[in-house]
Each structure stands twice: as C-alpha cells, then as structure tokens.
C-alpha cells in the first residue's frame, strides 16, 4: 500500500572511503497511527526536511516501509535474488560437466 510521508530529519553517517551517506527519517500515518522510519542510504538527490514523499508500506505490518525512488534496499534485495537465480543454471552445468567427466 502507499501513503504520503513527511521527511522530519536527515541522519548522516560516515561510510569510510565513499564519504558521507544520508538517511532520511520520515513519518507517515496508517489508520490514524503514526509511524516513523529511516530510509536507506542516499548519496544523491537527498530530500530536504519538510518534503512530502510517497511511502510504500506493508499493510499487514505498517511499520515496514520504504521510500520508492529513494530507497535502494529493495533494489539490492532484488539484485541478490536475481543474481542467485542466474547462478543456478551455471552451477547445474558445472555439476553435469563434473559428473560426465568422472
């Protein structure tokens, strides 16, 4: 499900060699209950405090949310999942090659 959230602050943390990462903290309401969450690391196009942003949340667990277009957690998870799926045929081929050579 989606709703509109409000950026209430920007947290920053040093990430070693790559510099400073920014994490937008946002609040949103679901069924009259206020939730606050911290977005994923953002290095470019950091929203300003007071910006209204779209928020996607899990209707079964509204505390679970992300900022589409900003949060890259979802993209990292999808990259890992599709990477694993892509490795399966390669591993099968290697297994068949090893089995036929023995």
Image: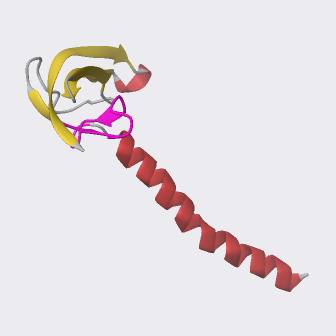
Q: Position of residue 16 (x, y in %)?
A: 43, 20
Q: Is the magenta stretch mostly helix, strand or loop?
A: loop
Vertical position of residue 101 compared to residue 27: above or below: below
Quarter where residue 49 is shown:
top left
Q: Residue at (37%, 45%) from the top-left corner?
A: 74
Colour pattern: secondary structure
Q: How many marks?
A: 0
In the image, taking residue 4 as reference, residue 20 lies left or right, namely right
**Residues drawn in magenta:** 55-70
Q: Does the magenta stretch include residue 68?
A: yes
- Quarter of the figure with residue 43: top left
In the rendered view, would you say 8 is above or below 88? above
Q: Position of residue 52 (x, y in %)?
A: 9, 28
Q: Nearer the viewer, residue 19 or 36?
A: 36
| Residue under the image location 35 percent in, 28 percent down | 63
**Residue 98 image offset from top left, x and y in percent:** 82, 77
Q: In which quarter of the image is the C terminus?
A: bottom right
Left or right placement of residue 65 versus residue 82 in this view: left
Q: Where is residue 40 in the image (x, y as percent from the top left)?
A: 33, 30
Q: Quadrant of residue 33?
A: top left
Q: Residue at x 20, y 42 (%)?
A: 2
**Would residue 97 be counted in the magenta stretch?**
no
Residue at the outermost right position: 102
Direction from residue 99 to residue 19 in the image, left or right: left
Q: Nearer the viewer, residue 29 or 13?
A: 29
Name the residue rendered at 24%, 44% in the picture: 1
Left or right, residue 49 beside residue 66: left
Q: Which of 11 and 100 is in front in this view?
A: 11
């Amino acid at each position: 499900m989606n709703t509109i959230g409000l950026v209430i602050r920007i947290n920053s943390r040093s990430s070693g060699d790559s510099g400073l990462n920014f994490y937008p903290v946002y609040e949103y309401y679901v069924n009259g209950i206020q939730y606050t969450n911290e977005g994923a690391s953002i290095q470019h196009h950091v929203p300003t405090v007071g910006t209204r942003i779209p928020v996607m949340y899990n209707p079964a667990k509204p505390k679970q949310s992300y900022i589409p277009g900003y949060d890259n957690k979802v993209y990292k998870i999808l990259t890992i999942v599709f990477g694993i799926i892509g490795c399966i045929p390669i591993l099968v081929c290697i297994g068949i090659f090893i089995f036929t050579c023995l």
